[in-house]
């Protein structure tokens, strides 16, 4: 057999090996989400690839048979094809005792290098770049190969299945997508420029709705503006003028714990504009209010809002005491993050690169995100940054009290009737201690 025929034979084996290599990596790397999108667009080849991913045993058995057969033939043919010609060429310069060994080593290196580069490395890297497109192209010829090698495939695949069953190893490919997977893809998309950073934060905030409690977004008990049934008209005018809101809870007595409903500003303003008298006790404008427990997550609260067709709810604890007020806007502010209303005061204000002024009622999750802290100690025992400081101090704080945690120092700078109003956070180097 001439040198040309030998070289052509090696090239043919390299092409066959490259086909099997790219087929293997493309099927393994193809993502079901993209394949299903292609199927919806009318590319029926995607269904064949999805079927192969569900039961890949025969597919990979054919690939391994092909790769091993080609490797053996390549070794036999390569040594016999090139060694005599390399031997003759080297003999022109050297005719010593090691000539046979040297010619064999060069022949072996050339054939092995060609197979590694062109039959394995380049095809697999190509298959990783466009796995779905290549998988669609090779699915049909691989199906033909599975039929041609059916007896061998049945034998080897049966042995492999028996070994898997013996060691109780699952052969079912799982493609369950979790919220962590989506977050990782969003992060990769942001780094690649597909998503804006704000879009990435928006996706993260949406998934946090199922883990954050209602207390992390609600207005606290002390901040609730409410009306009472027996309140005078002058008092009603003053509250509505000084602290305007879309809706006001209505209580039987001068205590938020006696809440019985709410009144919409749209029902009050026409009466005020006409100069009509307002009496919550006589005018039938008090509506039934939604009551939610403080154990709900924000996602569960959204479902309650949807079912009740309301956008405001009073939050109560296990003792039926009102602990806060939650509105649909509060939940949306949590989702939108920095895209808050211009009339809403920011809870976290960054003073410079290493310091922040934080409102005491700021949800601990927001503080973790702003300061890039993975987790606070005992975070399940409190909802706000004020709660964290009290948890660490183990007492009611006073001004200038400081807590050092990790690389940050949390100093109480303002107290309002035993309530932490403002906290100054500075970045330091520390192990986590209280003062």
Image: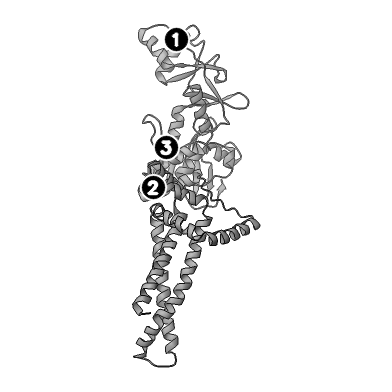
Q: Position of residue 145 (x, y in %)?
A: 46, 59
Q: Considering only order in the chain, which callout, 3 or 2, is on the residue closer to the N terminus?
A: 2
Q: Quadrant of residue 91?
A: bottom left
Task: Point out which mark residue 190 bears.
Answer: 2
Determine which residue is flagged by label 3.
337
- Residue 117 appears in the figure: no
Label 3 Cα neighbours within 10 Å, binned few <14 / some 14-19 / many ≥20: some
- Residue 207 appears in the figure: yes
321 relative to 419, above or below: above
Q: Position of residue 141 (x, y in %)?
A: 42, 57
Task: Point out which mark residue 233 bears.
Answer: 1
Q: Considering only order in the chain, which callout, 3 or 1, is on the residue closer to the N terminus?
A: 1
The residue drawn where x is 61% and y is 40% is 394
Q: Residue furthest right?
A: 166
Label 1 Cα neighbours within 10 Å, binned few <14 / some 14-19 / many ≥20: few
Q: Secondary structure at mark 1?
A: helix
Q: Residue furthest bottom?
A: 96
Q: Position of residue 319 (x, y in %)?
A: 63, 25
Observer-nearest residue: 434 or 281? 281
The residue drawn where x is 48% and y is 72% is 72
Indicate which label's residue lies in the foreground, 1 or 2.
2
Indicate which label's residue lies in the foreground, 2 or 3.
2
Point out the image quarter for the N terminus. bottom left
């Amino acid at each position: 057999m001439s040198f040309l025929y030998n070289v052509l034979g090696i090239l043919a084996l390299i092409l066959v090996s490259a086909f099997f290599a790219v087929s293997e990596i493309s099927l393994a790397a193809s993502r079901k989400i993209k394949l299903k999108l292609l199927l919806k667009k009318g590319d029926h080849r995607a269904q064949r690839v999805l079927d192969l991913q569900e039961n890949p045993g025969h597919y990979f058995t054919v690939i391994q048979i092909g790769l091993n057969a080609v490797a053996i033939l390549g070794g036999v043919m390569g040594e016999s094809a090139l060694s005599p010609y390399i031997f003759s060429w080297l003999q022109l310069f050297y005719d010593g005792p090691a000539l046979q060994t040297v010619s064999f080593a060069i022949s072996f290196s050339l054939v092995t290098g060609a197979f590694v580069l062109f039959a394995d490395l380049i095809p697999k890297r190509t298959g990783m770049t466009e796995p779905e497109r290549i998988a669609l192209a090779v699915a049909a010829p691989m199906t033909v190969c599975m039929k041609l090698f059916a007896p061998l495939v049945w034998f080897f695949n049966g042995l492999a299945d028996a070994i898997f069953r013996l060691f109780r190893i699952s052969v079912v490919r799982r493609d369950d997508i979790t919220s962590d997977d989506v977050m990782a893809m969003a992060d990769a998309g942001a780094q690649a420029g597909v998503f804006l950073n704000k879009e990435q934060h928006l996706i993260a905030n949406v998934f946090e709705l199922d883990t954050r409690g209602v207390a992390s977004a609600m207005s606290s008990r002390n901040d609730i503006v409410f009306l009472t049934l027996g309140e005078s008209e002058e008092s009603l005018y003053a509250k509505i003028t000084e602290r305007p809101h879309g809706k006001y809870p209505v209580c039987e007595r001068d205590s938020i714990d006696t809440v019985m409903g709410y009144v919409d500003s749209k029902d009050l303003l026409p009466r005020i504009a006409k100069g009509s008298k307002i009496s919550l006790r006589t005018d039938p404008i008090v509506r039934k209010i939604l009551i939610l427990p403080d154990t709900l997550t924000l996602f569960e609260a959204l479902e309650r809002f949807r079912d009740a067709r309301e956008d405001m709810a009073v939050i109560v604890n296990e003792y039926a005491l009102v602990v806060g007020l939650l509105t649909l806007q509060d939940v949306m502010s949590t989702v939108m993050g920095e895209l808050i209303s211009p009339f809403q005061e920011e809870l976290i204000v960054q003073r410079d690169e290493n310091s922040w002024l934080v409102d005491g009622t700021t949800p601990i999750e927001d503080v973790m995100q702003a300061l890039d802290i993975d987790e606070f100690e005992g975070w399940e025992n409190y909802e706000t940054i004020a709660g964290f400081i009290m948890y660490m101090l183990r007492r009611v704080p006073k001004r200038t009290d400081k807590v050092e945690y990790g690389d940050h120092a949390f100093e109480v700078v303002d107290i309002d009737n035993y309530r932490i109003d403002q906290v100054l956070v500075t970045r330091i180097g520390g192990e986590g201690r209280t003062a």
